[in-house]
Amino acid sequence: MNIKPEILALFSQGLDSILAIKIIQRQNLKVKALKFITPFFGSEIKGREAEYCRKIKGSYEIDLEIIDLTDDYLKMLAAPEYGYGKNFNPCLDCKIIMLTRARLRAAELNVNTIITGEVIGQRPFSQRRDTMRRIEKLSQTEGLLLRPLSAKLLPPTNAEESGLIDREKLFDFSGRGRKPQMALAEEFNLKNYPTPAGGCLLTDPGFGQRVKTLYENGRIPTATDIELLKFGRFYPLTSADEFIITGRHRLDNQALLNIADSRYYILQLAEMAGPVTVLKGPESKLPDAAVKLIRHSKAKTLPEVRIKWRKGKENGNFTIKNPGPAHQSAPNLKNHDN
């Protein structure tokens, strides 16, 4: 039976967000947690959301709802209003889009408080006091947004002033140290909590550059494009909407086969085992994709190589002469191997 929540929480599965929820649950308040997913974080649970929610409920006694931000996020990433971070990460816009969606969901549920696991000073930009205040203002969550781990260092929220939440039972954590959180985890008897991790893929310089390539000339890639970028060697073509990806090993190859749908060409060697190559582009680019396939296979020593391909229900094969090492540095096939 669904119980009407009194508090809405943002949930990342990290220790801080778990602790924030536990602090509020300890005040006998009912909390519903929201986990946002995009191709850049949380995508591993897509397609098994119900299973994941059951796991979180069983592990932490947290009621969870999954919200997929993919469409809005991909559009925002083309031109984030507040710019990018060190790489291709739109951290400020990301926080705003999540809190805005949480605010709208809170309104639907008639909930007047949103909590997060943020700690003042834990991150050099997004968790500075001034940035945190700015995010509240831009997401229209002023007075609604409570950070239980650092609440005593921040102005009281509506929930504290109304007496719904006892401010004296909140905390004053700050900085990047983890000892206070670990001690609190012991107090709550939390044993199997995740260690801090990298989080968003857009903070990775190599992956961020791949994604940035697909946004050139005002293009917006699809979610499937982004998923494919996570595997293999990436070769952008002359158009931002065209690329070649060649698997590096068995796991890459299987992932590319699983992800590529009828919008993409899939190429393989016709007469021996080898990597999987995916082409997004016109049929005229099949020879370019074949060259990349040959380059990273045992067929690179053969004078001619037979290639098989398929795209949706279409399929075919062709023979290509091995162009040799000279072709491998063609200017329009720059490799982003990272």
Image: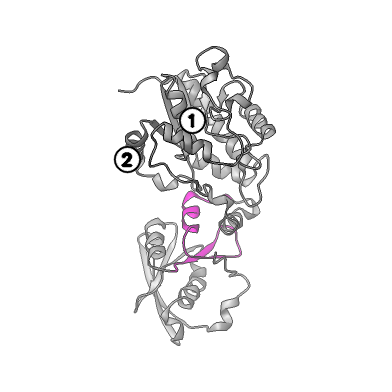
173 or 58: nearer the eye? 173
Return the x and y of residue 149 as percentages of the image width and height: 54, 30
89 to the left or right of 310: right
Residue 241: in magenta span: yes
Q: Name the residue under label 2.
A: 51
- Look at the image and tell me in which quarter the N terminus lies: top left
Q: Which residue is drawn at 48% across and 83% down?
A: 322
Q: Nearer the viewer, residue 183 or 116?
A: 183
Q: Pointer 1: what residue? A: 20
Q: Is mark 1 on a helix, strand or loop?
A: helix
The residue carrying pointer 2 sits among few (fewer than 14), some (14 to 19) or many (20 or more) residues within 10 Å by Cα, namely few
Question: Looking at the picture, does residue 34 appear above or below residue 160?
Answer: below
- Relative to 74, does residue 265 appear above or below in the rendering? below
Callout 2, which amino acid?
Glu
Q: Is residue 27 magenta?
A: no
Residue type marked 1:
Ala
Residue 171 appears in the figure: yes
Res 11 seen here = no
Extreme residue in the bottom direction: 303
Mark 1 or 2, nearer chain start? 1
The 10 Å Cα crowd at callout 1, few under 14, some 14 to 19, many 20 or more, is many
SS assignment at label 2: helix
In percent of the image, x 35 and y 20: which residue is there?
3
Residue at the location (50% across, 42% down)?
Answer: 70
To which quarter of the image does residue 336 belong?
bottom right
Distance from the alpha carbon under mark 1 to that under mark 2? 23 Å
Q: Where is residue 270 in the image (x, y as percent from the top left)?
A: 35, 76
